[in-house]
Amino acid sequence: MNSELTEIFLNGENSLTEFKEPSVSPQTLAEEISAFANVMGGDIYIGVSDDGRVTGIDSARIKNLEQTAMNICRNSILPPLIPLFETIRFNDKLIARIRVPEGIEKPYQTASGKYMIRVGSTKRNSSREELLRMFQNARVYHIDANPVAGSEKKDLDLDKISAYFRDVYDLETRSMDQEEFDSLLVNASIATRFHAGLCASLSGLLFFGLKQKLGSALETHLPHAGIQFVAYEDDDLGSIIDRLDCYETSPESVDAVIHKIRLNWKTSSLIKGLKREELTFPEGIFRELVVNAIVHRDYSIRGKIRIKMAGFKFHLAEYEESFSASLEFP
């Protein structure tokens, strides 16, 4: 390890390597990290001067430095990143390495609105043409087929996928070899190729995300794709009587939410003459609202679909009310 690092420090900064002192500012670190993520990824060594001389980091500062780096990646870079932070002992001195992967949700920007790129041993603001190319490569207009950061082929329910192709296309996938099956997943936009392997696409996780005992792939990799249902005792919205955070795949998610709405539906009735008529549960109306919210929402916006129910009042909203619908029954 030390011999490898010695060579890195002797060779100096380049397209994949950056040196920083422990006093580096959060803003500068955010720019360096996002610049690497927007190109090919790279390593940032903290505790190393610009000329490759190892100055080290005080052991008391290491933990705080790690927290600072992770907070920067979570709060000062959009969309958030998850780098690898390592503490390394080099010739009796502590240094830190932030290993930034090539981003799969490019372009990344800093909280101050800068789109940085790595060029040789320096970072700079991207040009208009470079930024446009990043947006085109990111396929922002076809986000359903975009790769989901951190996901893998194993996050997909292969049994459900096989059943889908068998029932809809009369295609038996179990007889396919690995390469043929992987190509089918890519061509169907269920998965996408990234580096040497496959990762799930957004639509792949939405429809075929694997459900496990302790959670689901959808909740792990696309937490903002969930549906939150809350039922209140009255219109004051002060007392919660039921709640559901749904991370089922589609169309099962629709059934799960409709089931909760039905459980909290208060039977009402109308008096017509001498007869009392009970209102039937309007499942079709609720189902159409939920389906439209799932199908037409913008999954690039990181906010859940939220449903509030109080008595006979029903309110469905997407992130920050970008879409909303309210119903009130007699």
Image: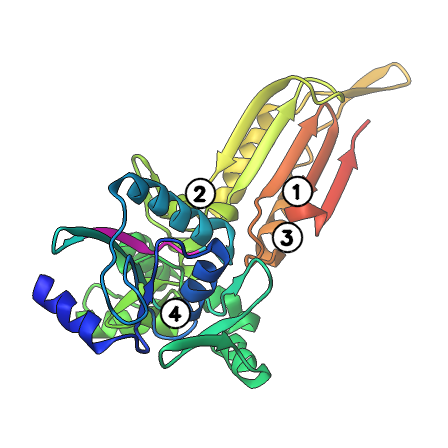
Taking the spot 59% from the left edge, 60% from the top edge, the residue there is 112
Please tell me in which quadrant of the rendered image residue 52 appears. Answer: bottom left
Q: Which residues are magenta?
A: 81-88
Taking the spot 39% from the left edge, 66% from the top edge, the residue there is 103
- Residue 294: x percent and y percent? 58, 51
Q: Nearer the viewer, mark 2 or mark 4?
A: 4
Q: Earlier in the sequence, mark 1 or mark 2?
A: 2
- In space, the residues marked 2 and 3 are separated at their CA atoms by 16 Å
Q: Nearer the viewer, mark 1 or mark 2?
A: 2
Instruction: Compare residues 231 and 71 and report the one nearer the observer.
Output: 71
Please tell me in which quadrant of the rendered image residue 202 appears. Answer: bottom left
Q: Name the residue beneath numbered marker 2.
A: 248
Q: Name the residue beneath numbered marker 4.
A: 36
Q: Earlier in the sequence, mark 2 or mark 4?
A: 4
Taking the spot 49% from the left edge, 65% from the top edge, the residue there is 108
Q: Nearer the viewer, mark 3 or mark 4?
A: 4
Q: Nearer the viewer, mark 1 or mark 3?
A: 3
Q: Identity of the amino acid at label 1?
A: Gly
Q: Earlier in the sequence, mark 3 or mark 4?
A: 4
The circle drawn on residue 284 is 1
* 30 horizontally vs 314: left or right: left
Question: Marks 1 and 3: CB-CB under 8 Å?
Answer: no
The circle drawn on residue 292 is 3
- Residue 220: x percent and y percent? 38, 45
From this viewpoint, which residue is outermost toward the right?
Answer: 273
